[in-house]
Image (tube, rainbow, N blue to C red):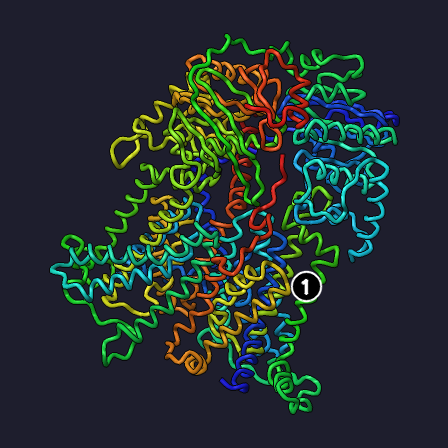
Amino acid sequence: MERLPKWADVALVPLISLLLAAIIAALVILAIGQDPWEALTVMVQGSVMNAYGWGYTLYYASSFMFTGLAVTVAFHASLFNIGGEGQAQLGGLGVALACLFIPWPHWTLALLGAATAAALFGAAWAAIPAYLQARRGSHIVITTIMFNYIAAAVLIFLLVDVLRPDGQMDPATARFPEAAQLPTLNEIPGFNLIFTSNVPANVTLFIALGMAVVVWLLLWRTRLGYAIRAFGKSEAAARYAGISPFAIIMVAMLISGGLAGMMAINNVMGEAERLLQNSASGAGFIGIAVALMGRNHPVGVVLAALLFGFLFQGGAELGLWTKIPIEMRTVVQGLVILFTGALDVMVRMLLTWIFNLFRAGRAVKGAA
Amino acid sequence: MADPRYAIELKGISKSFGPVQANRDIHIAVPRGTIHGIIGENGAGKSTLMSILYGFYRADSGEIFINGKPTAIPDSQSAIRAGIGMVFQHFKLVQNFTVLENVVLGAEEGALLAGSLSRARRVLGELSREYELDVDPDAVIEDLSVGHQQRVEILKALYRQADILILDEPTGVLTPAEADHLFRILKGLRDQGKTIILITHKLREIMETTDNVSVMRRGTMVGTVRTAETSPEELAELMVGRKVLLEVEKAPALPGKVVLKIEDLRVRDEHGVERLKGINLEIRAGEILGIAGVAGNGQSELLEALGGIARATGRITMNGVELPLSGKGADGRARRAAGIAHVPEDRQALGLIMDFTAWENVAFGYHDAPEYQKNALFMDNDALRADTERKMATFDVRPPIPTLAAKNFSGGNQQKIVVAREIERNPDLLLVGQPTRGVDIGAIEFIHKQIVALRDQGKAILLVSVELDEIRSLSDRIAVMFDGQIMGLRDPETTDERELGLMMAGMTGKGEAA
Amino acid sequence: MDYATLLQLLDTTLRLATPLLFACLAGLYSERAGIFDIGLEGKMLMAAMASASVAFLTGSVWVGMFAGMAASLVLAGIHGVASITFRGNQLISGVALNFVASGITVLIAQRLFGQGGRTPPLAGDARFEAITLPLAEELRGVPVLGPLYAEVISGHPLLVYVALLMVPLTWWVLYRTRFGLRLRAVGENPAAVDTAGISVVGLRFAAVAITGILCGLAGAYMATALQAGFGREMTAGRGYIALAALIFAKWRPVAALWACLLFGFFQALALRPDVVEAVVQVKVPVPFLDALPYVLTVLVLAGFVGKAIPPRAGGEPYVKER
């Protein structure tokens, strides 16, 4: 059997996976008695057909870029970080503390400080599972899942008992001061011509895109990235080459946790402007789908994040305008992970088979 | 119709894996009650042929006759039913099961175990007495020596009433004494009317044990001869298709100062078993020190300890400077900085990242070398690719494409990439493990020449190989290892194979000063 | 803490340990056969929704239970196809199916009942009722042991006893039957099984199917015995805790029972902050108690309670060697 051409492997495999996920999602919608075509129309209308929709799509995409990059970096070290959700929540805590307790003179400085705090908190939350994996061989998949639950408990405690202002009922921090609020796209000159009404997408989008470039440079242009990728391919060989498994596991997870934490500048600082319970609202998990769909490459991650931004915003519209519950998003997310991550061999076999059919067809024509 | 005198007859067997034709129109007939050798180089297609016979692969074309009857063998179950038993090179035993459980697995009678186990215990007792195959039925496999584990494999086949026993490279992990015991068992089995197929690349075993021998080369069967009517020279020529020059042409060594001094080097494995038991050696500039020994006697641990992969105790001194053996500074990176390069035994698992491109692999272990850096932050991938092109030209790596992934090169060319990378660093000491395992004849000669050339530049070389011929033809001095210890040092000019063989079995020279 | 309170705690422990035990034994079959399954959670959730829905619609808890097992088997089948047939990444497959289950259970429940993804409360024959064991009342008067028997051992729904019986049954299957021998072998060295002429794929699918059935029971118990109906995300990480218990138990059935009882006890403690406060003499915030099982799981995984060696071939798809 012939191998797939490279372009097909890079572009067609994820697209076919997505198509399969979409077909099954459509069947699910049919099964619950709704119209998939109508669902798609509503999703497209509400997310990409007008500037307002784009404002939400890009807002979600910004978050998913961070979490997708986080999963990507860990994946390259052969680590499956499912803890993005908890790390992002801790990142939110970092943002809240930085915004509430430091009197920033200007939002640019506040952004810098909050981003640093978010990254540090996220990295710290990843550090313990990383250490346990590196030193004691505890399975990082299960420990990071446990840390998601622990993070949720920690935040509930802090929001209810510690950070909640007196007299406020809902478990959340106080609103951040004016100087710690980020400009949204409709407040940025130039963009305000497109985005005329208030949208949640904010300057974080550019930081997310910048981080994609940084991650790309890190993985394919630096010694550290080389070591991470080598370790991810073969731990035994990395040891032969003098690459320390402990150091790589720690550094890769710290970077991964830091990226997941940085997501909080988008949702906590850029949108909610205070820290709420369950602030990451699933974006940490979506990072897994985004990384797999994006083939663990920053360019792919950015594209997949946009796609999931569309799905997320479109899914919310479904919840508003149709009888399809918003949980449809989770189903699609699971299906994408299934097809791109676990059934990729099947997709590849399918594609190779189709290619060989075409090749055979051409060979027959050539002979005739 | 096939001849019923033959236990096995294969007619026109062909098998290809993608573009690689592993077997091409193979014909072979094995008379019942004989030991039949199949000899050929690595990659000649011996194992593929036997896997077809055992139902692991289906042949693309051709027929199989067992005792004269055409037999289809689509899976291992059919092979077992046809009376074929197989002892694989890598044993197929469940490590934490007892001998009894391993023997019974797949040959149980009924859904409950108790009956099967007691029957197996009785049969095992009978088989042990009959064929010198004594093993404790209640021993757990991981506690047994390799020789005993192999006996369990033979018992498994006999318990399934195999009439035809295939053994794939059975002596690779055995000491000469264990190998002799195995051959006695095999002859006993033959005398009871069983048919035995012995796959090996060792001429000596073929000459000593078999009745007939078939020679394979590059997927084809080049001939079958009576062992009594042939000679090792003739077989060797059939194997490679031309006269082999196993002697490497080299000038006498001019040993200089001591480069590496090893004192009381000890290594424990993850189970706490001591695998290196106090090694003392000196390696001088301008000499090749060969380590001879049966696989698994501590050679790998020696290379790994010196290469910074395994933790060790004792003392090693490189050019007069002591190097740490554990903790900080005891890794491959520090060793490379100290002037030690390492061509590992297993290039696919250690020496290369198979998914990386050739140019990425050329940086493997040296990715922080200054010439590969553009600035403080970034690596200079262009310089690396240019360097790879140059190395590929010097070492005749084919195809000379730096962007091709390592897994897409042949074994010989993969090895050339590793050797090029390590030798071109101009190390003071080169550690080389199994430099020509799975490498074609042309590349073997080339790699041998490179090693000798490095020696002639006044560098020290530590060569580990399980191929005694390779050790004898390349080394200036030979150290024989057995059971984690050095049995003694010999001059290859004045020592014959017999003496080395005895030392490899731990028979003489124990405790001799290095 | 008085004896009555202790008995109450132990009673709750047994009730809460039961779904963990089903799920833990479910994972044991799969992982002993070399297939990692972090999708226990999703299978339980599916089964909980299916059993509660069908029990409500038919009014029979038994029909509901079988529906739960069937729903769980569907997910197990997908996991099997992905990880055995197509040799996909078993961890990713498990994670994916957990998401699918998390979403689709709400979708289906919403479609059926329109109550925000919940099922209506179950009552009567649509639920497993508590069973009073023989002589429970008569023996209540016996000091110490009598109340223990009457309060803790007796008075649970049938599935609690089924779960407990699964422990010796699993032990017997694993160590005394041909199937058990082969199952353990395929998780340690599938090549040995393959060369012995047994189908690796067949064995692994069988193991994955048993996992599906037991997760089905776990989910059915959650929705029709422990609680009276399905609610979104009602399994709340129990699938993962069961996995941790499995590691803690070193993949052995009897040890799995003790591990699940221990984790069940921690969950029971989290429900009784007043008891905890009385014992430790400090006010403990409820979120801390909620997090306790997860923290302990991490401590267990960190190996502070002994090193666990997983089945050697675990997580690795079987590919014939060339």
C13 or B125: nearer the eye? B125
Identify whether A153 is placed above or below B481: below
Q: Amino acid at mark 1?
A: Thr
Q: Is residue C321 visible?
A: yes
| Residue B312 located left or right of residue A124 | right
**Residue C275 falls in image quadrant:** bottom left
Q: Residue at x 68, y 63 (%)?
A: C170
Where's the C terminus of chain A, which quadrant?
top right
| Residue A105 located left or right of residue A300 | left
Q: Which residue is mark 1?
A: C170
B58 or B165: nearer the eye? B165
Please count the marks in the image: 1
| Residue B426 located left or right of residue A169 | right
Where's the N terminus of chain A, which quadrant?
top right
Task: Tell me if mark 1 has few (under 14), some (14-19) or many (20+) residues whose alpha carbon lies within 10 angstroms of its own.
Answer: some
Q: Chain of mark 1?
A: C
Q: Position of residue B164 (x, y in %)?
A: 81, 33
Identify whether C58 is placed above or below B227: below
Identify whether C318 is placed above or below A335: above
**SS under mark 1:** helix
Q: Position of residue B323 (x, y in %)?
A: 40, 32
A155 or B202: nearer the eye? B202
Q: Position of residue B445 (x, y in %)?
A: 54, 14
Identify whether B133 is placed above or below C155: above
Q: Position of residue A354 (x, y in %)?
A: 53, 40
